[in-house]
Image: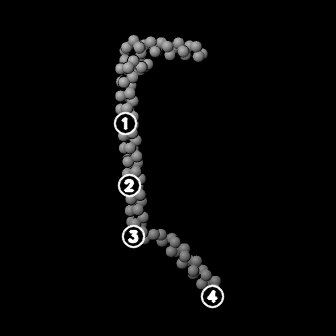
């Protein structure tokens, strides 16, 4: 009799596990997954917006700084077309030759 009861209990446990979650549980789990996915996407969008804003500010700052240097004759980039830029570029090439 003990063997029969044990066998029925084991079979009952397997049948409960095999049934899986109910439709309500499935819907609830799906809704939670969607909510988490939306939250993650919102976080990613916010982080991307912040990064974009930071980069835009850095570009604006560096552009303004570069214009100031060029106006002061310190750009060294050779982009402004002034004589000082060409002279500094020639000096950099000369320094590189000596470094080798």
Name the disc covering residue 38, or none.
Answer: 2
Q: Position of residue 86 (x, y in %)?
A: 42, 13
| Numbered circle sitting on residue 41 | none
Q: Nearer the viewer, mark 4 or mark 1?
A: 1
Tell which tag, 2 or 4, sits nearer the viewer.
2
Q: Which residue is mark 4?
A: 1
Spatial CA span between label 2 and label 4: 55 Å
**Distance from the alpha carbon under mark 4 to that under mark 3:** 38 Å
Give the percent coordinates (x, y) of residue 5. Answer: 59, 84
The reply to whether dot 4 and dot 3 touch (C-beta < 8 Å) is: no
- Residue at point 42%, 20% (across, down): 74
Name the quadrant containing residue 33: bottom left
Mark 2 or mark 4, which has the lower sequence index? 4
Does 96 appear above or below 3? above
| Disc 2 residue crowd, few under 14, some 14–19, many 20+, Cα 10 Å | few
Instruction: For label 1, count other residues whose C-alpha is less than 10 Å away and answer few (under 14), some (14-19) or many (20+).
Output: few
Q: Is residue 92 left or right of residue 27?
A: right
């Amino acid at each position: 009799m003990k063997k029969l009861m044990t066998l029925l209990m084991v079979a009952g446990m397997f049948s409960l596990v095999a049934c899986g979650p109910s439709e309500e549980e499935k819907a609830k789990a799906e809704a939670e997954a969607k909510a988490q996915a939306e939250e993650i996407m919102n976080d990613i969008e916010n982080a991307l917006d912040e990064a974009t804003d930071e980069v835009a500010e850095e570009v604006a700052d560096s552009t303004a700084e570069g214009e100031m240097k060029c106006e002061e004759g310190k750009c060294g980039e050779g982009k402004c077309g002034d004589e000082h830029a060409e002279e500094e570029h020639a000096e950099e090439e000369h320094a590189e030759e000596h470094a080798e």
